[in-house]
Image (cartoon, rainbow, N blue to C red):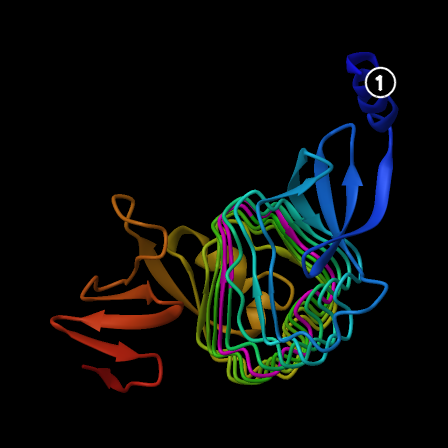
Amino acid sequence: MLFALMTYAVCMSAEILSHIQIGDVCYNLDTENMTAEVTSSNSGYYWQTTIDIPASVEYNDLTFNVTSIGDSAFYYCQNLERIHFSEGLLSIGNSAFRKCEKLRSVTFPKSLLTIGGFAFHTCSYFGSIEIPNNVTSIGEYAFAWCQHVRYAIIGDGVITIERYAFDHCVEMISATMGKNIKTIGDCAFWHCEMLNSITLPSTLTYIGTQGFFYCKQLCPFSCLAVTPPTLGNEVFSGVEKRSLEVPSESVAAYKSAYQWKDFNIDEIYIDDEANENILYKSDKQTRKVVHNGQVLIECGDKTYTLQGQEVK
């Protein structure tokens, strides 16, 4: 009997067991690495409104850690309203929740590393997005056409925002950028018409063609990069060229740089003893702070929105 069990275990060690139904969810089970990938269901998830993704699942007395949501796993599940992710999840695949139009804001686990292309495309009811600090790249079209998103907070681990990642998030007001972003892809914030609060980090080196196309409420905004980032074509087309705030030592460089020079350049000073999101005007009597994904201005003992409304 022991020999038979050992033989069974060895035989399983190189297998991928496909579409194994465990509870309400279907998995591909990797018996070599003892991991599980959530996959599409033969019977479909169409009528489910709530789904919980556990940290691990049991099958044939073996434990598998759930590490990924497979490509198109919940594609077009139009009745899905809530999804719960457990810690240990590492990746969300391409189109995993695409066209889940009733899905509301999700809480991503801190363990998450990658968000695939089109992952949440057309999740129209999202109200906010917060990307954990371990994520390094946001896939193309990942949150495109999430039309009711108001705030996006992008974690400090993100290096690349792929093309069209936030395309047509037309109600987005604020996007808080992580401190290590190097590249913003083509049309990444295309037609984010209400976006009025953004601070581009000091690490930024490139913004792709039409990266902020028709973000007509964008000005004023800040770019903390000492060297003006290289720009593709028409990056700020449709943006009113008002105030752009840049590091005090970089004013001359921005005033002569392609497209950047079209703005009215103002200098700011970064408080080296504080968070990079603390910015001072030249008189150092006011400062910008990021609070709950919204950029606010502190002046003395009062706080204001960028539109000049006092925050009580």
Residue 132 among magenta residues:
yes
Asked whether 188 or 92 is in front, the reply is 92
Image x and y of residue 281, in percent: 28, 64
Q: Is residue 126 above or below residue 16?
A: below
Residue at mark 1: 4
Q: Residue at x 56, y 68 (%)?
A: 261
The amino acid at mark 1 is Ala
Q: Residue at x 73, y 37 (%)?
A: 60
* Relative side of 193 to 299, left or right: right
Image x and y of residue 72, in percent: 80, 62
Image x and y of residue 242, in percent: 48, 80
- Residue 232: in sight, yes or no? no
Q: Which residues are magenta?
A: 130-157
Occupied quadrant, residue 126: bottom right
* Relative side of 45 to 135, left or right: right
Residue at the extreme top: 3
Q: Is residue 113 above or below residue 190?
A: above
Occupied quadrant, residue 71: bottom right
Quarter of the image containing the C terminus?
Answer: bottom left
Residue 27 among magenta residues:
no
* Relative side of 276 to 259, left or right: left
Q: Residue at x 52, y 55 (%)?
A: 253
* Relative side of 268 to 256, left or right: left
- Residue 105: in sight, yes or no? yes
Quarter of the image containing the N terminus?
Answer: top right
Q: Secondary structure at mark 1?
A: helix
Image x and y of residue 135, in percent: 58, 48
Asked whether 109 or 141 is in front, the reply is 109
